[in-house]
Amino acid sequence: MKKRRVFRLLLKFVKNFLRNQCIMITIDDYTTMKCSVNVDISQNSLLSSILYLFYNMNLLKACDNIKLRTSFTDFINNVNILIYKKFMKCNCRVLSEIYDRCEQWSKTHDIKFLKTKHELIHFTRIFKWFNMNIDVKLIKHQINLKSNIRVLRVQLNFKLKWAIHMHYVEAKLVIKQKIMQTIIKFT
C-alpha cells in the first residue's frame, strides 16, 4: 500500500485492524478475561475487497498495455482482459503474452489461477470476415473458444447481441415468480 502512495491514516488503520486485537466473551453474568486473537480478513469483509485491489495492482498493470492494445476490467478477484486488434491470431498471441506476465506475477505472490475459470471469446458484429475458431494455446494448457460467456452476471455472446442475456434474465424471473407465488399461497 505504501508503494501506491496510500494515505498514512489508512495504512495505520489497516495495520491496527490486523494486529493487537483482543476479545472478551460475555454470557449472562460471566465475562472472560481479555484474550488476544489473530485477525484474518475474510473474503466477505468490505476491507478485503479494498485491500485486494492494492494487492493485485501490479497484475492489473501487466494486463493494461497501450502498445499491445490491451485493457482490463476488474471486480475484486475477477479480472477480464480485453484485446482490441483487427486480427484474431494477433489477439491470441497478445493474450498469450499477457497471460505469461500474469503467471509470473502469480508465482511471486504465491497465487494459483483456476484453469477452469479461463474463458475465451472473440467479439465482432461482422463475424463472416474473421476466423472465429482460433483458440489460445498457453504454456501449460489451451483455452477453448466459447460463443457465450458471463462477466459479472451479464451474459455476452460473440455477436454482441443481447438476446442471450435476455433469455438468462427471463429464466431468472420465472424462478423468482414461482417463489413469489408460493409465498403468496401461504400468506
Image (spheres, grey):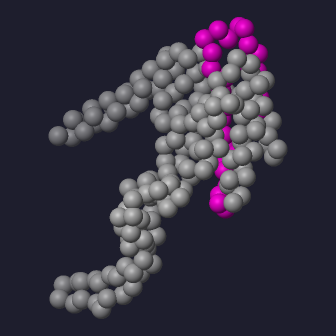
Tell me: 12 left or right of 125. left
Is residue 117 something one can see in this rendering? no
Residue 113 in the image: above or below residue 149 = below
Q: Is residue 186 within the magenta segment?
A: no
Give the image location of residue 129, x and y in percent.
72, 8
Q: In which quarter of the image is residue 67?
A: top right
State the residue at coordinates (49%, 61%). Answer: 2
Is residue 157 something one can see in this rendering? yes
Which range is magenta? 109-136
Q: Which of 103 and 116 is in front in this view?
A: 103
Tell me: 177 left or right of 165. left
Q: Which of 71 and 155 is in front in this view?
A: 71
Tell me: 77 left or right of 46. right
Give the image location of residue 124, x and y in percent.
63, 15
Q: Report the label total.
A: 0
Q: Is residue 132 within the magenta segment?
A: yes
Query: Which image quadrant: the C terminus?
Result: top left
State the residue at coordinates (65%, 28%). Answer: 69
Q: Nearer the viewer, residue 71 or 180?
A: 71
Q: Quadrant of residue 44?
A: bottom left
Q: Which of 114 and 66 is in front in this view?
A: 66
State the residue at coordinates (43%, 54%). Answer: 50
How would you classify the magenta stretch by its main secondary structure? loop
State the residue at coordinates (27%, 32%). Answer: 181
